[in-house]
């Protein structure tokens, strides 16, 4: 669930929230990635979104909604949402039980954690994610396949590096803290401390707030400025 969207610079495309009109969308598929993580695919209809945005999802007649970053690309004919099933989270369990043809209420898209297309040919990007925080980066890369980026994905175990074959092998580093089967054994913050020496990047961070806070401190200590850093954090 998304909590905070904070952009610390001006090199970003700001997009206004779309009309706040509830719409019903059919579920097309629920695809398991791990025992507790899945991709919920819903029909796209005429929804227009920009990679990095999110939608609000509600099960009809349920009093609550949840916010999810869009996992699919701008040109895909469907909307994919990457969801981690939380043992104490009733909503993530209910969504996993949806079947093809079930209806969901969807609002959006909204959010400004997006890339400025005018900078894609000139800037270098460093994307830093933990867990399902990889969603907006997956959408970026599907939408804009030809730009200069490197993606760090921090997970506990290597099997949690969701669909890592989506990305060119030389553009992703999987950081694993629970096993040594990733590209780097340790947390993404440890990777930043040991491996990042250049400040010639625009840095986008998405994941849990503890990681983001620590990463920002490390990056600023290395000389990164506020207008190079863009964040979207979870609980």
Image (cartoon, rainbow, N blue to C red):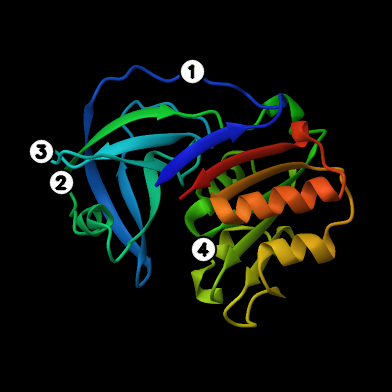
Q: Is residue 56 left or right of residue 7?
A: left
The 10 Å Cα crowd at callout 4, few under 14, some 14 to 19, many 20 or more, is few
Residue 146 appears in view: no
Asked whether the beta carbons under mark 3 and mark 4 sit within 8 Å of each other, the answer is no
What residue does disc 2 label?
102
Residue at the (19%, 51%) spot, across then down: 100
| Separation of residues labelled 4 and 1 (CA atoms) | 31 Å
| Separation of residues labelled 4 and 2 (CA atoms) | 25 Å
| Separation of residues labelled 2 and 3 (CA atoms) | 13 Å
Q: Of the two numbered discs 2 and 3 on the same chain, state the one appearing first in sequence.
A: 3
What residue does disc 1 label?
16
Residue at the (58%, 55%) spot, across then down: 210
Q: Quadrant location of residue 117?
A: top right
The 10 Å Cα crowd at callout 1, few under 14, some 14 to 19, many 20 or more, is few
Q: Secondary structure at mark 3?
A: loop
Q: Of the two numbered discs 1 and 3 on the same chain, state the one appearing first in sequence.
A: 1
The 10 Å Cα crowd at callout 2, few under 14, some 14 to 19, many 20 or more, is some
Residue at the (43%, 20%) spot, across then down: 17
Asked whether the beta carbons under mark 4 and mark 1 sit within 8 Å of each other, the answer is no
Q: Is residue 104 left or right of residue 20?
A: left
Q: Of the two numbered discs 3 and 4 on the same chain, state the one appearing first in sequence.
A: 3
Say above or below: 162 vs 120. Answer: below
Residue 220, given in percent of the width and then of the height, sits at: 80, 45
Say above or below: 58 vs 9. Answer: below
Asked whether the beta carbons under mark 2 and mark 3 sit within 8 Å of each other, the answer is no
The circle drawn on residue 61 is 3
Residue 97, given in percent of the width and then of the height, sits at: 19, 59
Q: Secondary structure at mark 4?
A: loop
């Amino acid at each position: 669930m998304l909590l905070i969207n904070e952009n610390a610079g001006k090199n970003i495309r700001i997009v206004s929230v779309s009309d706040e009109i509830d719409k019903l969308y059919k579920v097309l598929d629920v695809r398991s990635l791990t025992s507790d993580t899945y991709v919920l695919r819903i029909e796209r209809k005429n929804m227009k979104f920009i990679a990095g945005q999110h939608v609000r999802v509600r099960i009809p007649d349920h009093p609550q909604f949840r916010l999810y970053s869009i996992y699919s690309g701008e040109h895909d004919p469907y909307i994919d949402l990457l969801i981690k099933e939380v043992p104490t989270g009733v909503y993530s369990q209910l969504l996993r039980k949806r079947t093809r043809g079930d209806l969901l209420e969807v609002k959006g898209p909204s959010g400004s954690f997006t890339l400025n297309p005018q900078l894609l040919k000139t800037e270098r990007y460093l994307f830093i994610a933990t867990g399902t925080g990889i969603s907006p980066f997956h959408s970026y890369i599907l939408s804009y396949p030809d730009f200069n980026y490197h993606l760090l994905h921090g997970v506990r175990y290597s099997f949690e590096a969701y669909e890592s074959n989506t990305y060119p092998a030389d553009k992703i580093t999987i950081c694993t803290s629970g096993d040594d089967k990733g590209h780097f054994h340790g947390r993404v913050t440890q990777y930043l401390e040991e491996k990042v020496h250049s400040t010639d990047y625009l840095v986008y961070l998405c994941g849990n707030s503890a990681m983001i806070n620590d990463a920002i401190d490390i990056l600023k200590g290395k000389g990164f400025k506020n207008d190079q850093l863009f964040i979207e954090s979870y609980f």
